[in-house]
Amino acid sequence: MNDMITLRGWVGTEPTMGLTKHNTPYSRFRMSVNERRFDRERQSWVDGHTSWYNVACYGHIADNVAESVHKGQRIIVLGRLQIRSFQRTDGTFGTEADLVATSLGHDLALGIARWNRRRDEADRGPSLRSTTQVEGIGAVDPATGEIAGNPGPDELFGPEPEDFGEDHEFLGPNGTGAAYEGAEPPAQSDRAGEVMGPEGRLLSA
């Protein structure tokens, strides 16, 4: 499976930064997407199943994510989805949903974002400007993060998913293990790309 999809959900882990073996900057984090359904008996919206995704960004998007996106924020992501099977150390098998993001932003339905134009490409260093190929992925546009080839899951996320520990179950305000529609994540510090609630409270992580 390799499709372009749009996801709307919560950042469940603080993004991590790194370089591929070909010096392409990347950022990775976990994202939870919560199902919402209307309960006719209660006549109200209730929480349903929560799905978790591994999200990866490349090039300038990765750099911008590092300065703008944090755990607990509500975001919208457009990217290429891959469903990956893996074998655990105990011999059992599992499935992971990996998403290579080509566009990403804060969900303004639940907060206020302050957008700043990114720095000029000349100020970003040679590693970003000179990188155009990633093994197993293909050509990467350093300005947009667009990927021409098919992503290789081992290059993106490793042969086996990371152990996210407690971050894997990002508790929402209702303590159910998933932040629900309209809920406010914890208030956080003032940083670039911060998101604030309707009453001016920060929603950054």
Image: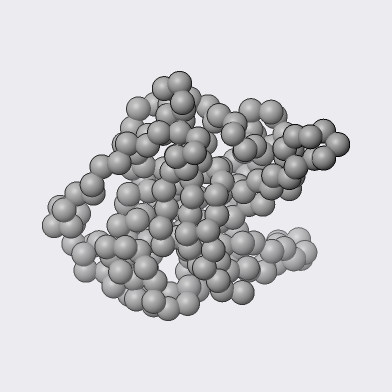
Q: Position of residue 137 (x, y in %)?
A: 43, 74
> Between residues 183 and 72, which one lies in front from this camera angle?
183
Residue 197 drawn at (x, y percent): 46, 27
Left or right: 29 in relation to 65? right
Could you tell whether 18 is left or right of 117 in the image? right
Question: Would you say residue 23 is visible in this rendering?
Answer: no
The residue that appears at 53% across and 27% down in the rendered structure is: 186
Q: Is residue 105 above or below residue 85?
A: above
In which quadrant is the N terminus drawn? bottom right
The residue at the far left in this view is 122
Q: Nearer the viewer, residue 11 or 107?
A: 107
- The residue depicted at 59 percent of the width and 34 percent of the height is 182
- Colour scheme: one colour
Horizontal relation, residue 102 to residue 99: left or right: left
Task: Measuring from the top left, give residue 12's x and y in whole percent.
Answer: 56, 42
Tell which of 94 and 179 is nearer to you: 179
How many numbered tags mark residues here? 0
Query: Taking 98 as reference, is 191 above or below it?
Result: above
Which residue is found at the position 20% from the left and 54% from the top?
124
Instruction: Say whether residue 144 is visible.
Output: yes
Q: Is residue 27 above or below residue 143?
A: above
Seen in the image, is 25 located left or right of residue 41? left
In which quarter of the view is residue 59 placed?
A: bottom left
Q: Name the residue furthest right.
A: 41
Q: Position of residue 94 (x, y in %)?
A: 72, 63
Residue at horizontal 30 percent and vertical 57 percent from the top:
60
